[in-house]
Image (cartoon, grey):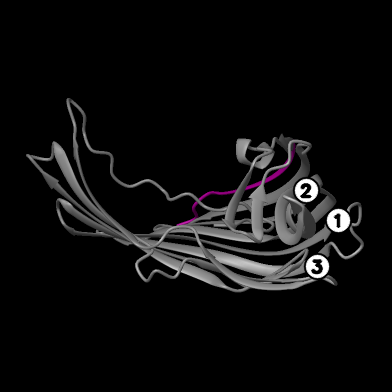
Amino acid sequence: MNLPRAESSVYTSNNRRPSFWELNPFFSFTDARNRFGGNPNLDPEFTHSIELNHIKYWDKVTLTSSIYYRNTNEKVDRIRRLEELIENGDTSTVMVTQPENLNEENAYGFELTFNAKPYKWWNLDGNFNFYRSIINGTNIGQELTADNISWFARLTSRFTIRKNTDIQIRLNYRAPRITTQGSSKAMYHVDLGVSHDIFKNKGTLTLSVSDVFNSRRWNYETITPEFYLKGEFQWRARSIALSLNYRLNQKKRRGGRSGGYGGGGGQF
């Protein structure tokens, strides 16, 4: 059977305005020598992008492929600096981390996204993105440049083991990256969810486990002529949640595709 396919090219131009936290001029402290804050002088990022997309349909599989190029002016990146601080007549050196506007970022790569339903009880979808990102930050420092080749991927598997019970597993992986001031190691995490319909399908009991193996940790190195820094950061430790949803005069929505990542250096 010959199923339809589609091809398209898209050009877009948009801007991303800094968030509240990126503009917040007040600093937070993890200890006496490290300060984190926003930058009220940040400008928006302006991005011009072009994509060429292709979609192919089979009986049980849909595959979307694309190649893209993106140019971002006023690229926002978090920069670390050593600064002298004078308090009560005493001078100390502190590490200050703030977002800054860099000249630009040029990113290009290709992306594959698929959705498959091998059996009525099994739905599978995933995303793979391979890219090269070149960042130029010489407007604020000769050493603030990066030429990074990396990739990230996501795979989601959803099973219906009984008529009213679903299990979903999501795997995420991001390969090591080169940054403007050093590098970051690979990062991965797994999420798990189990849902069961009750009360004659009017209610759903859901058990979800975020970061099953407690592995979503950002390990990084910062290397500059002035200092060397090695650290680890974890957004949130593994968490478990149990919830009950009861629907009034509504039917449960099943299926739906999971969201993916943007191209060119996206994070998760």
Circle 2 residue: 100
Between label 2 and label 3, give the one nearer the viewer.
2
What residue is pinned by disc 3?
A: 147
The reply to whether dot 1 and dot 3 touch (C-beta < 8 Å) is: no
Q: Rounded to the nearest whole Å, what is the CA distance between mark 1 and mark 3?
A: 12 Å
Which badge, 2 or 1, is on the more N-terminal residue?
A: 2
Residue under the point 42% across and 49% down: 257
Compute the Cα span from label 2 to label 3.
18 Å
State which quadrant residue 189 falls in.
bottom left
- Callout 2 amino acid: Glu
> Dot 2 lies on which element?
strand
Q: Position of residue 230 (x, y in %)?
A: 65, 74
Is-magenta flag for residue 118?
no
Instruction: Establish if 46 lies above or below 235.
Output: above
The label shown at residue 137 is 1
Q: Residue placed at 81% from the left, 58% from the top?
A: 135
Magenta range is 1-13
Q: Is residue 45 left or right of residue 121?
A: right
Q: Nearer the viewer, mark 2 or mark 1?
A: 2
Image coordinates of residue 31 in percent, x first then y, are 58, 60
The reply, left or right, for residue 251 in relation to residue 152 is left
- Do tag 2 and tag 1 residues touch (Cβ < 8 Å)? yes
